């Protein structure tokens, strides 16, 4: 059984139907890249997986449990599915360490000492052991994004969603974030990422999902999909990037 | 004949002014603390997704912001006894100030809440925090920080507005002044001194709120 299963997911914003029946299963340890043009629905799809967007129709099953849009269900879902955003979204009034400690303390009711230990571990893991006492505005974009990854990891999620995590970064800062994501993938973390880093997707991912006009247009092994696109849309998308 | 100034005529009545300053201070402190607390709850309700509560708070805010403070005070002190709610002068004055500041601060604090980037709220949601936790740990402090100068001004306005409470014989500073000038007819001297006292209290209150703001929003590492 897959860790996350999406069946016939539909989502509209007003008149605009953004997701037109998505089926996707995510296995434990799998690394999936969602690619496609802007407006293709990839970010919306990612956001439905942890309930930031409430679906209009369809079924989401996480770890064998069907998720409704009741608050209790959503909170339970989010305990299992972490997320990292394009804009980092660190809490500006807390240090890096406090950002990472907050949720384990208030949601998981861990003791301060316990939360601190895990937070220090996670920040060390993303290479920021020396920046723990810094506030977000004292960190570079790449460092902020790594704190955001550590913050999500401290909740010990089963799946980590990454929404264009390098898109807001200066080019020279992209690699330090990708290195962390790559390391997570190698450690067996289940990852779903919306990305424009095609080379990275090709090297790191197990499965590529190409979205087009609210549907999964083509999917498969990245190597295969990239070198042998079956549809003209993917062909032109991949070609346009080369 | 020229008017002969005699500030010495106030001296025998200094106790009245002193008591007035104390009472004004008490009204202001209680009114500000409870009023801002009410404003925080009101702002949360206004910003929340519960439409009924949000609308009820909306009516309260508009009702208070579009009627005179003096009328609100009279309603509480002279009107409510008809419903069996009898309040002392002090109770009525403090309640009017709380209700008044609550409405204004609801709108001010709501502006601060709306200024919090949606991304931070989504980040908190994705960390499985519930609404109360998000409000308490992620939203309220940065929101208050953004609007602290506006809120401070409103608190000073309410402090100055407390002079109106003399009209129901709450024995605050203006009541003291009125009383003294009725005894000695030294209106110029009395109100000159009282103006100075309000000025000093306003400046001190502003300074105090600034210090409080620095304390609340100072970067203090908790670990």
Image (cartoon, rainbow, N blue to C red):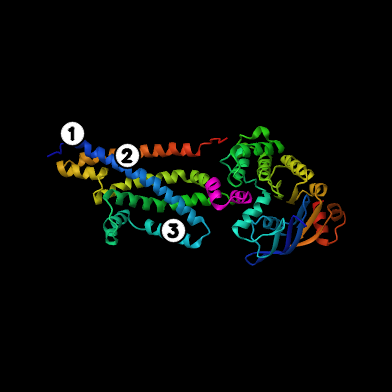
Query: Of label 1 and label 2, which has the lower sequence position?
Result: 1
Label 3 crowding class (10 Å Cα cut-off): few <14, some 14-19, many 20+?
A: many
Report which residue position mark 2 lands on.
B199
Image height of A147 relative to B39, above or below: above
- State the SS at label 3: helix
Chain on which label 3 sits? B
Query: Of label 2 and label 3, which has the lower sequence position?
Result: 3
Report which residue position mark 1 lands on.
B8
Residue B163, position as x, y percentages in the image: 29, 47
Q: Is residue A238 left or right of residue A144?
A: right
Report which residue position mark 3 lands on.
B57
Q: Mark 2 vs mark 3: give the one in front.
A: 3
Front residue of B43/A2: it is A2
The numbered dot on residue B125 is none
Q: Mark 3 vs mark 1: give the one in front.
A: 3
Q: Residue at x 32, y 39 (%)?
A: B199
Q: Which residues are magenta?
A: B119-139
Residue A71, position as x, y percentages in the image: 59, 57
- State the SS at label 1: helix
Q: Is residue B129 magenta?
A: yes
Image height of B148 relative to A229, above or below: above
Image height of B62 relative to A90, above or below: below
Q: On the same chain: label 2 and label 3?
A: yes
Front residue of A222/A132: it is A132
Please identify the residue farthest to the top as the structure is shown: A130
Q: From where the camera sits, is residue A194 visible?
A: no
- State the SS at label 2: helix
């Amino acid at each position: 059984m897959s860790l996350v299963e999406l069946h016939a997911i539909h989502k509209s914003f007003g008149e605009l139907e953004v997701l037109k029946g998505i089926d996707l299963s995510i296995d434990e340890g799998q690394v999936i890249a969602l690619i496609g043009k802007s407006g293709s629905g990839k970010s919306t799809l990612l956001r439905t997986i942890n309930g930031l967007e409430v679906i209009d129709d369809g079924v989401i099953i996480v770890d064998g449990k069907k998720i409704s849009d009741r608050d209790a269900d959503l909170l339970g879902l989010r305990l299992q599915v972490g997320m990292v955003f394009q804009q980092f979204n660190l809490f500006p009034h807390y240090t890096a360490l406090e950002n990472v400690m907050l949720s384990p303390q208030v949601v998981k009711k861990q003791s301060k000492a316990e939360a601190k230990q895990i937070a220090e571990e996670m920040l060390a893991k993303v290479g920021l052991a020396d920046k723990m006492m810094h506030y977000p505005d004292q960190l570079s974009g790449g460092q902020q994004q790594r704190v955001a990854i550590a913050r999500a990891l401290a909740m010990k999620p089963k799946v980590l969603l990454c929404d264009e995590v390098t898109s807001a970064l200066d080019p020279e800062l992209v690699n330090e974030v990708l290195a962390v994501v790559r390391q997570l993938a190698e450690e067996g973390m289940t990852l779903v990422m919306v990305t424009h880093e095609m080379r990275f997707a090709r090297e790191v991912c197990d499965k590529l999902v190409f979205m087009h006009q609210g549907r999964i247009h083509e999917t498969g092994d990245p190597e295969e999909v990239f070198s042998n696109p079956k549809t003209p849309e993917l062909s032109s998308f991949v070609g346009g990037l080369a | 004949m020229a008017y002969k100034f005699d500030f010495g005529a106030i001296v025998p009545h200094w106790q009245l002014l002193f008591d007035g300053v104390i009472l004004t201070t008490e009204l202001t402190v209680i009114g500000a603390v409870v009023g801002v607390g009410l404003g925080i709850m009101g702002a949360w309700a206004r910003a929340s997704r519960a439409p009924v509560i949000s609308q009820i708070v909306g009516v309260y805010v508009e009702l208070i912001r579009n009627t005179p403070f003096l009328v609100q005070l009279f309603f509480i002190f002279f009107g409510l006894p008809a419903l069996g709610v009898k309040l002392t002068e002090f109770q009525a004055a403090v309640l009017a100030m709380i209700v008044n500041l609550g409405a204004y601060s609801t709108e001010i604090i709501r502006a601060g809440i709306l200024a919090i980037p949606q991304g931070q709220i989504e980040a908190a949601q994705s960390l499985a925090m519930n609404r109360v936790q998000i409000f308490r740990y992620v939203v309220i402090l940065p929101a208050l920080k953004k609007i602290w100068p506006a809120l401070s001004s409103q608190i000073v306005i309410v402090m100055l507005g407390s002079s109106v409470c003399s009209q129901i014989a709450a024995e605050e500073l203006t009541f003291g002044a009125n009383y003294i000038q009725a005894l000695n007819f030294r209106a110029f001297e009395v109100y000159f001194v009282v103006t100075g006292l309000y000025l000093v209290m306003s400046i001190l209150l502003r300074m105090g709120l600034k210090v409080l703001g620095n304390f609340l929003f100072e970067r203090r590492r908790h670990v």
